[in-house]
């Protein structure tokens, strides 16, 4: 392969979070429900595990957060930054190349080095 | 149920106003959440949204009005008295009602061991054990959400996460849990079942802890480099501060020779008080971050040594003997021992153990207090950790 991908699987939650927050600002609870709905409950995680991901992304400058009033309750909502959008584009490109290489490999193709 | 909620609301507001643990924002957030719950309950009772909001707001205002009278101590005492009143009031006549009451108290942030003890006293140990624990031991254990959160917080702090980060994580988890409980209740689960389901969805204690501690860069820099946080930085800071004060007073003495005595007093005070304050600050940070005592102790010893040395040097290099143009603290620190002889140096160092003793007093008391709890049955140990 042309590049190393140590975070190939570990950054899947990050990509999901960034992809969903690209659409609009959300709180953690909404985010988890959206992931569950869109993946048809295919991705089931302990819902509390989303917060370490959100906090890490915020620390890295990919997200910003603020407290908002949602339905009478005060909640922390997250929004994607320009840096987060670039990061998502970058990770999505890498992900596409990798999945295509793996599919090729599994299907018995010889174009594995393309990734 | 509504009367119980009224009592809880009253209790909640009184104790949040009287307590000093949470920040103002957290208190207001809790009140907001309480109000939202109340509005939902009014709606469930058949009121339209506008009416439900008006009723809930009126009740909250009324409670605030009541709570705003009297001093803090008085309010606190009244809050505790009310708490006892709730617990010693009518005994729930069914297991379900009892569990419901336990759940309400838990959501108000009252630790399970508190109301569990009172309940056991009210209806008898045997009945209590046979009723709640025997009927659904696992479900009752799951009710210990408040304790689970505090255990999670403790684990994260011990793993080296910064207290502010831990607090934020726990706050968000609590809010998420509250949303999940509402969702489960709307889906038709009963009170206890809804809580249990919501907690299962949120994730177990181990998962929640490892999700946070397993991330790169999660630990605070003071946990990654305790030698720097508790030894190098404080000692260098102290030297810089004392040197700065000495430099400033020397410069001031050249311009205002009439104020030599005042400036000298300032230097002596700086040398004796700065190390002490710095040592106390280190103690507070170490306790707050659940730091093991090794590096904080080394840091405090170093600070007290520097403090004692500085005091000795400043007493030898006062304006009377060396004049206002003295070469400054840093040079004195290196040169004075050789010039003044070991005896003088040694007598100066005698200040160090005294300062260390003052620092250690506070540290040891805090260390002891962190692990200490009121003995079972103490009347004033109604702690509201929500």
Image (cartoon, rainbow, N blue to C red):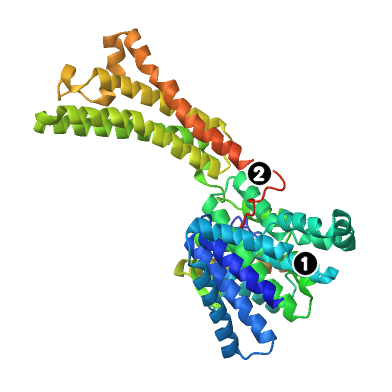
Determine the image quadrant of residue A43. bottom right
Q: Residue at x 56, y 47 (%)?
A: B219
> Would you say residue B309 is visible in this rendering?
yes
Q: Position of residue B375 (x, y in %)?
A: 69, 43
On screen, residue A40 versus residue B235, left or right, reads right
- Could you tell me which quadrant the N terminus of chain B lies in? bottom right
Q: Which mark is residue B196?
A: 1
Examine the rendered structure and indicate whether residue B267 appears above or below residue A108. Answer: above
Q: Residue at x 58, y 61 (%)?
A: B78
Q: Secondary structure at mark 2?
A: loop
B26 or B225: nearer the viewer: B26
Please, which chain is the residue tagged with disc 2 on?
B
B283 or B364: nearer the viewer: B364
Q: Secondary structure at mark 1?
A: helix
B331 or B71: nearer the viewer: B71
Q: Position of residue B337 (x, y in %)?
A: 31, 13
- Could you tell me which quadrant the C terminus of chain B lies in? bottom right
Please, which chain is the residue tagged with disc 1 on?
B
Of the two numbered discs 2 and 1 on the same chain, state the one appearing first in sequence: 1
Judge the density around disc 2: few (<14), some (14-19), many (≥20) Cα neighbours within 10 Å: few
Determine the image quadrant of residue A112. bottom right
Q: Residue at x 77, y 61 (%)?
A: B142
On screen, residue B281 versus residue A111, left or right, reads left
For marks 2 and 1, give the CA distance. 28 Å
In contact (CB < 8 Å): disc 2 and disc 1? no
**Which numbered mark, 2 or 1, is in the foreground of this view?**
2
Q: Position of residue B339 (x, y in %)?
A: 26, 10
Q: Which residue is mark 2?
A: B373
């Amino acid at each position: 392969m042309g590049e190393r991908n140590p975070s190939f699987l570990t950054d899947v939650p990050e990509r999901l979070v960034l992809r969903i927050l690209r659409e609009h600002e959300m709180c953690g609870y909404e985010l988890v429900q959206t992931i569950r709905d869109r993946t048809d409950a295919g991705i089931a995680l302990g819902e509390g595990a989303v917060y370490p991901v959100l906090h890490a992304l915020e620390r890295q400058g990919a997200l910003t957060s603020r407290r908002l009033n949602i339905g009478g309750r005060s909640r922390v909502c997250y929004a994607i930054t320009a840096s987060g959008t670039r990061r998502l584009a970058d990770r999505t490109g890498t992900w596409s190349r990798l999945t295509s290489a793996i599919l090729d490999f599994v299907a018995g193709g010889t174009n594995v080095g393309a990734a | 149920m509504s009367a119980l909620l009224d009592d809880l609301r009253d209790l909640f507001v009184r104790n949040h106003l009287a307590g000093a643990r949470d920040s103002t924002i957290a208190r207001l957030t809790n009140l907001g959440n309480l109000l939202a719950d109340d509005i939902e309950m009014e709606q469930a009772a058949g009121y339209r949204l506008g009416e439900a909001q008006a009723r809930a707001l009126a009740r909250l205002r009324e409670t605030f009005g009541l709570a705003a009278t009297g001093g803090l101590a008085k309010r606190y005492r009244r809050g505790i008295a009310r708490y006892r009143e709730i617990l010693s009031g009518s005994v729930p006549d069914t297991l379900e009602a009892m569990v419901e009451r336990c759940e309400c108290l838990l959501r108000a942030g009252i630790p399970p061991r508190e109301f569990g003890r009172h309940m056991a006293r009210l209806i008898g140990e045997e009945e209590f054990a046979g009723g709640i624990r025997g009927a659904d031991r696992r479900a009752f254990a799951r009710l210990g959400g408040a304790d689970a959160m505090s255990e999670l917080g403790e684990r994260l702090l011990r793993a080296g996460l910064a207290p502010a980060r831990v607090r934020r994580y726990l706050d968000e988890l609590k809010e998420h849990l509250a949303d999940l409980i509402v969702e489960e209740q709307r889906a038709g689960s009963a009170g206890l079942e809804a809580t249990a389901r919501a907690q299962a969805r949120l994730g177990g204690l181990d998962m929640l802890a490892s999700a946070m501690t397993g991330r790169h860069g999660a630990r605070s820099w003071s946990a990654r480099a305790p030698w720097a946080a508790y030894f190098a930085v404080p000692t260098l800071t102290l030297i810089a501060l004392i040197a700065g004060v000495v430099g400033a007073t020397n410069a001031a003495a050249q311009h205002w020779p009439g104020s030599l005595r005042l400036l000298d007093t300032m230097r002596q005070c700086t040398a004796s008080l700065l190390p002490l304050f710095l040592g106390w600050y280190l103690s507070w940070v170490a306790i707050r971050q659940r730091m093991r005592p090794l590096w904080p102790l080394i840091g405090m010893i170093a600070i007290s040594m520097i403090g004692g040395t500085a005091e000795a040097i400043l007493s030898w290099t006062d304006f009377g003997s060396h004049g206002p143009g003295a070469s400054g603290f840093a040079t004195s620190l290196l040169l004075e021992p050789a010039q003044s002889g070991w005896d003088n140096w040694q007598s100066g160092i005698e200040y160090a153990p005294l300062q260390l003793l003052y620092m250690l007093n506070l540290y040891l008391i805090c260390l002891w207090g962190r692990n200490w709890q009121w003995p079972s049955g103490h009347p004033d140990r109604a702690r509201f950790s929500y």
